[in-house]
Image (cartoon, rainbow, N blue to C red):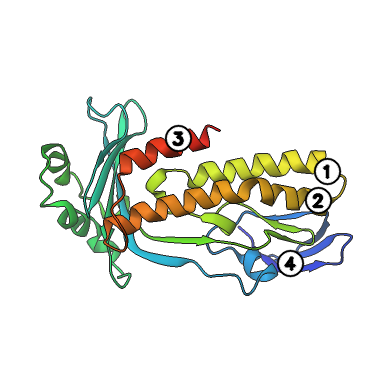
């Protein structure tokens, strides 16, 4: 529940003050603080800002139907998927073009989500539309992305996850890439003789893999909303699984 107020890296350690008035000196600071990373802004004030894609995603939970035993994806300018969460629960995601990044009032979210898929010619989807009734249960997020081309660390401060490679969810790999970052960072910290060597090696191992996920996911997004060529989602997903298995 607190944030960083100041970071002072003197080469021997990082003096940090927090928003609750506490402070400390640390060997390493890891900024794993998301798309709008405060840490990124502190060490790289000129880094690119997150960019809205022109598409947003709507999500809603349902009682799982027996046929949903894996991801069911429906292609189109409005992309839809059903995803099992447990024996009892599944969720629906709906990706929609949202020119201008509009704001929707919370009290209208359920009715707006229903309207976005009211004309979808799928009996399975239409059987669920009427169950979208609770505004508080609708999760609506504009889709944004960013990728840091340069260094991922400065001195004793390093970035991880969405703070350096935020992706759209079209390949379902955002959280996975952050977890991998943490494992590789830990591995390099153990192996290296110096902190700078470890942090540079961490970035070098992760860079192309994370770029692939960001760019491939964004390409699917842009194809769906007419900002690029249409991508075969099933083929792209198969290729992604082969890539992340390496």
**Lower sequence index among marks 3 and 4:** 4
Q: Label 2, label 1: how many angstroms apart (C-alpha)?
A: 6 Å
Question: Which residue is the extreme one toward the front?
Answer: 229
Is residue 135 shown above or below 19? above
Q: Which residue is mark 1?
A: 192
Which of pointers 1 and 4 indicates the residue nearer the eye?
A: 1
Residue 80 left/right relative to 126? right
- Asked if labels 4 and 2 touch by Cβ distance under 8 angstroms, the answer is no
Q: Position of residue 174 (x, y in %)?
A: 49, 47
Residue under circle 4? 21
Q: Nearer the viewer, residue 183 or 126?
A: 183
Q: Are marks 1 and 3 in contact (CB under 8 Å)?
A: no
**Where is 74 relative to 9, above or below?**
above
Q: Residue 134, percent across and down?
A: 25, 51
Q: Earlier in the sequence, mark 2 or mark 4?
A: 4
Under circle 3, the secondary element is helix
Residue that badge 2 annotates: 197
Mark 1 or mark 3, earlier in chain? 1
Q: Which residue is mark 3?
A: 241
Q: Residues within 10 Å of mark 3 (few under 14, many from 20)?
A: few
The label nearer to you, 2 versus 4, is 2
Q: Is residue 115 left or right of residue 170?
A: left
Which of the two labelled residues, at mark 3 and mark 2, occupies the earlier sequence position?
2
Q: Is residue 140 visible?
A: no
């Amino acid at each position: 529940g607190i944030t960083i107020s100041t970071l002072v890296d003197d080469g021997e350690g990082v003096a940090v003050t927090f928003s609750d008035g506490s402070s400390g000196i640390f060997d390493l600071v890891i900024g794993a603080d998301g798309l709008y990373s405060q840490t990124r802004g502190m060490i790289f004030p000129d880094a690119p800002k997150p960019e809205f894609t022109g598409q947003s995603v709507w999500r809603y939970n349902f009682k799982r139907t027996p046929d949903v035993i894996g991801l069911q994806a429906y292609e189109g300018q409005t992309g839809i998927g059903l995803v099992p969460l447990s024996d009892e629960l599944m969720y629906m995601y709906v990706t929609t073009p949202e020119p201008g990044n509009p704001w929707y009032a919370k009290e209208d979210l359920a009715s707006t989500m229903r309207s976005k898929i009211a004309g979808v010619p799928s009996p399975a989807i239409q059987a669920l539309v009427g169950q979208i009734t609770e505004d508080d249960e609708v999760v609506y997020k504009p889709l944004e992305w960013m990728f840091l081309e340069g260094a991922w660390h400065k001195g004793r401060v390093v970035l991880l996850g969405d703070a350096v490679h935020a992706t759209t969810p079209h390949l379902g790999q955002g959280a996975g890439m952050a977890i991998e970052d943490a494992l590789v960072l830990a591995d390099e910290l153990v192996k290296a003789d110096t902190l700078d060597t470890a942090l540079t090696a961490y970035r070098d191992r992760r860079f192309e893999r994370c770029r692939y996920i960001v760019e491939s996911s964004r390409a699917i997004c842009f194809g769906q909303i007419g900002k690029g060529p249409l991508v075969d989602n099933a083929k792209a997903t198969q290729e992604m699984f082969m890539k992340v298995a390496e």
